[in-house]
Image: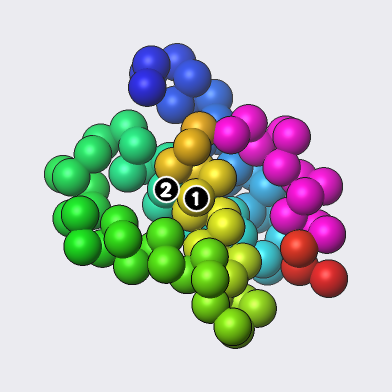
């Protein structure tokens, strides 16, 4: 991931995190950091655990998993703002 894109997405996600109490955005940032820094940020085992949260029966854990996956997939936070709100409801 290019540094400029990483910084842009990181800054946008931090702003969205600060506007809401949703667990989506901290998880998004964790996934984004995993993509940018690789195993130096999270081990492969920790990475798998975060991805497994997408299938959790607990709605909050599932939201974290989807946020992590979105960050890891480098999805634009602006495009996700509405999506995150719908998932949280």
Q: Which residue is mark 2?
A: 31
Q: Is residue 26 above or below residue 76?
A: below
Instruction: Give the residue at mark 1.
Output: 69
Relative height, residue 26 to residue 12 (above, below)? below
Which corner quadrant of the image does residue 70 belong to? Answer: top right
- Report crowding for label 1: few under 14, some 14 to 19, many 20 or more residues within 10 A (C-alpha): many
Asked if residue 26 can be seen in this view, the reply is no
Q: Residue furthest front?
A: 55
Residue 47 in the image, given as x and y percentages of width and height = 30, 57
Which one is nearer the viewer's eye here, 70 or 21? 70
Q: Percent x, y for residue 61?
A: 54, 75
Confirm whether the magenta stretch covers residue 81: yes
Check disc 2 and report its element: helix, strand or loop.
helix
User: Tags 2 and 1 in contact by the CB under 8 Å rule?
Assistant: yes
Helix, strand or loop: magenta stretch: helix
In the image, is residue 35 above or below residue 86?
Answer: above
Where residue 38 appears, as percent x and y from the top left, is 23, 39
- Residue drawn at 72 percent across, 34 percent down: 78
User: Where is residue 43 drawn, in percent x and y?
Assistant: 18, 55
The answer to which of marks 2 and 1 sits earlier in the sequence is 2
**Point 76% across, 68% down: residue:** 88
Q: Which residues are magenta?
A: 75-86
Please determine whether, in this image, residue 24 is positioned above or below residue 55. Answer: above
Task: Give the alpha-carbon distance from disc 2 to disc 1, as whole Å.
Answer: 6 Å
* Magenta span contains residue 43: no
Which residue occupies 18% across, 45% down? 39
Visible in this render: residue 89?
yes
**Which quadrant: the C terminus?**
bottom right
The mark closer to the camera, 2 or 1, is 1
The disc placed on residue 43 is: none
């Amino acid at each position: 991931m290019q540094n400029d894109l990483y910084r842009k997405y990181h800054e946008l996600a931090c702003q969205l995190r600060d506007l809401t109490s949703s667990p989506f955005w901290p998880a998004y940032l964790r996934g984004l950091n995993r993509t940018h820094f690789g195993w130096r940020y999270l081990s492969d085992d920790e990475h798998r655990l975060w991805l497994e949260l997408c299938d959790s029966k607990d709605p909050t854990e599932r939201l974290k998993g989807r946020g992590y996956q979105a960050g890891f997939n480098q999805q634009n936070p602006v495009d996700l703002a509405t999506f995150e709100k719908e998932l949280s409801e």
